[in-house]
Amino acid sequence: MATHHGELSNLEAHLVAASGEFVGTFLWLWTSYAGHLMVRHQAPGEAPEGGMLNTTLTSTALAYAFPLLANIWAFYRISGGLFNPAITLGLVAAGQLPWDRAIFLFPAQLLAALAAGGLVQCMFPWDVGETNTILATNVSISQGVFIEMFLASQLMFVVLMLAAEKQKATYLAPIAIGIAVFGIMVCGGYYTGASINPARSLGSAVAGRSFPGYHWIYWVGPAMGGVLGAMYYRFVKFIHYEEANPGQDHDGQLENKGLPDGATLPRDM
């Protein structure tokens, strides 16, 4: 239990974070699966190649990005608001999250996705399997893996630079993450469904009892992307990126080695 100082033990802190990650992931995916179904059933149909029509893609992207933004902001102080095993893995690879915490977060995220998919299947009149992430018929499995990898690496680097890397705009990180997810889904939704999240793909596949034979790409691709983004983050930290373009997080007076004593940069740089 809590120590005599009123502080949580390591185990208690992990359990609190895991509970927040479960609830946050559940609320996000329950809302997004339901929104995705609504969009599909108000759309005129699917694209000839099996992907989403451009008339529904924007609405589908909003159905995932906006609830994600809101829940990250709500749960950031409880669990970090990760909601994604690939991002969790990337944070570990970047040295921003300890393995012992990640071990608690992984199952919380996956179980929450299963619960969200199951409840949407029970509560709504349509099959949640319709929200499955699938490849367009003109996209190969190998293409799908690398599309998912690069989409996930984009999200990973945004998370690292704006949420994990503390700076003046950190409190706005949920907005940037939501915008990134929206752009990622618009970019990749037609080709792969733009999962970028193994939990998101697992929840709809299990509840809808619809596993494509290439389901594994929605685990491997995002995981590779998370690690790729983390490796680039480690690289720019290693070469001291802060010294290449000093003063970007300052409004006026600077303390950067690259500027003379007392020098300032214009506010509009």
Image: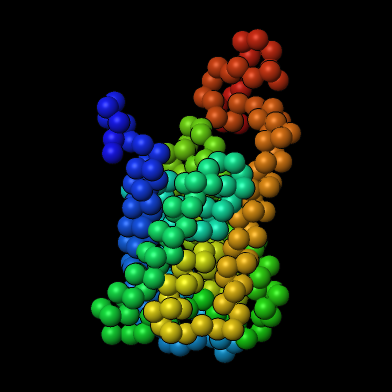
Residue at position x 68%, y 67% in the image: 146
Residue at position x 52%, y 66% in the image: 198
Against 183, residue 17 (above or below) is above
User: Is residue 15 something that shows in the picture?
Assistant: yes
User: Is residue 186 something that shows in the picture?
Assistant: no
Q: Position of residue 112 (x, y in %)?
A: 37, 64
Front residue of 9/82: it is: 9
Q: Position of residue 254 (x, y in %)?
A: 58, 18
Against 218, residue 69 (above or below) is above
Question: What scheme was used to colour the molecule?
Answer: rainbow
Against 235, residue 264 (above or below) is above
Q: Which residue is most to the top?
A: 261
Q: Position of residue 89 (x, y in %)?
A: 56, 53
Front residue of 180/153: it is: 153
Asked which quadrant contains residue 126, the reply is: bottom left
Residue at position x 67%, y 54% in the image: 228
Against 54, residue 126 (above or below) is below
